[in-house]
Amino acid sequence: MNENPQPNILLLFPDQWRWDWLGCEISPYGRVPVQTPHIDRLAREGLRLSGCRSNSPVCSPARGCLAQGLRYHRAQVASNEYSTPLHNPSIFRLLREAGYHTMTCGKSDLFKPLPDATQTGFLPIMDALGFSDGIDSRGKGDSINRARKGIDEPYSLMLRERGLLNLHLDDHPAQPLDRAAYPTPLPRDAYTDDFCGQNALRLLERAPAGKPWLLWVNFPGPHDPYDPPAEVLARYDGIGFPAPVNPNHASPAHRNPVADRRHYAACCSSIDDWVGRLLGEVERRGERDNTLIVFASDHGEMLGDHGRWAKSIWFEGSIRVPLILAGPGVAEGHSTAIVELIDVAATLLDIGGVNPPDTWDARTLRPLLQDASAAHRDFAVSQLKDWRCLTTNEWKLVETGSGEGETLLFNLVADPAELNNVAVQHSAQCAEFSSLLDRENPWLE
């Protein structure tokens, strides 16, 4: 792919970033006025893949599938209460064995139930998963809940040492954590995504010379609560956002789609600022020409579409995620090819000179990196315990329940907002897709 068989890898991985909430994307609404200039630059310089679906739109299952290169029914991470198994080789362990210095910071969500926090952010299980170094900190909710119990992890410890922890805790009600959107009272440099970015810089600084590195930057945002820094939110003063699609379902009374969408956009912009800073640091180190940059997310965010927020559902807003690659060996282009999030894992192994295990479901994106018009998959599969779906460029089949639930079929070309179930009119198509799901993604026992 390039002269150096082992380029560095910078994997930028925010939590709950919807696929079309980028300045460079066009959604069923049209173009959303979110400001992401640094990510848009990556898209111009590399390959933007608009057809990527998460294998399971919940944090730990999506990340467990990615780490193992396996689809949901085989990854053994059924929900957020499960850790990524250690008996399967992870992408991080395989790359470390191939000579990489592997690092992670932020909310990896690979080990749950959560072990006791450490103030350094590096746990023995991280070494077992294949990380050489790391500063793992909790997501927004986990950090707050544990801090209330007096258990510090790196982020809450930093806030405590700066005298800011009580301010942060007072800003968030007790359970549930989802709330009406408003900006954090914390100074910008103490915000959770800024803390993650700062730790990414620390890890790069202490990476050993003479070895290729992989850095997985797990920003806790733009996951709810939508609490961006006030100075970033001010960028959206006077800017309107498209209304949710089909919002007329039961919805929590505290939700305000106008405010939520503006605040969510500001959370995205806050992370985009750090994408720019991290790219600048790679350039300052003289490593940009030999560093593959990947921007993706674990799952999307409904943002009021169909009366829903967050994820865990089969709608496109939940399962469809951004995916951009730029760097050595990546031709400029845009593709709508069907891709599964786990394919990122096979691609990084391929680029690092490692053959993916024969047991993996993931497929390398190498042909697409060289030619954006190349084919990849005929369909993608996504799943949770109570539903599974198959998506092509034209169709989406959804099955809820194991043989006892509902079957839904949507034509994504004619009906991108997924408003009209046409399963009755296309029963043969449903039967064909259901047979494929039985083969590719059987129900969990």
Image (tube, grey):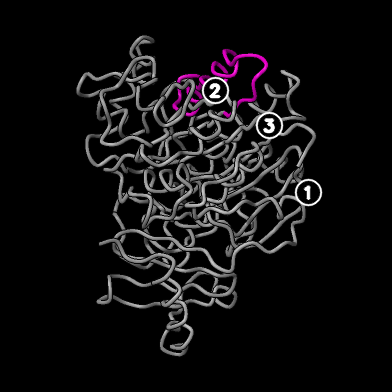
SS at badge 2 = helix
Q: Position of residue 262 (x, y in %)?
A: 51, 45
Q: Quadrant of residue 309?
A: bottom left
Q: Residue at x 68, y 28 (%)?
A: 279
Q: Is residue 235 magenta?
A: no
Residue holding disc 1: 332
Of the numbered discs 2 and 3, the one sitting upstream in the chain is 3
Question: Magenta segment, which residues?
Answer: 188-214
* Figure quadrant of the N terminus: top right
Residue 6's label in the rendered image is 3
* Figure quadrant of the C terminus: bottom left
SS at badge 3 = loop
Residue holding disc 2: 200
The amino acid on which the numbered mark 3 sits, given as a three-letter code, is Gln
**3 vs 1, front mark:** 3
Q: Is residue 206 magenta?
A: yes
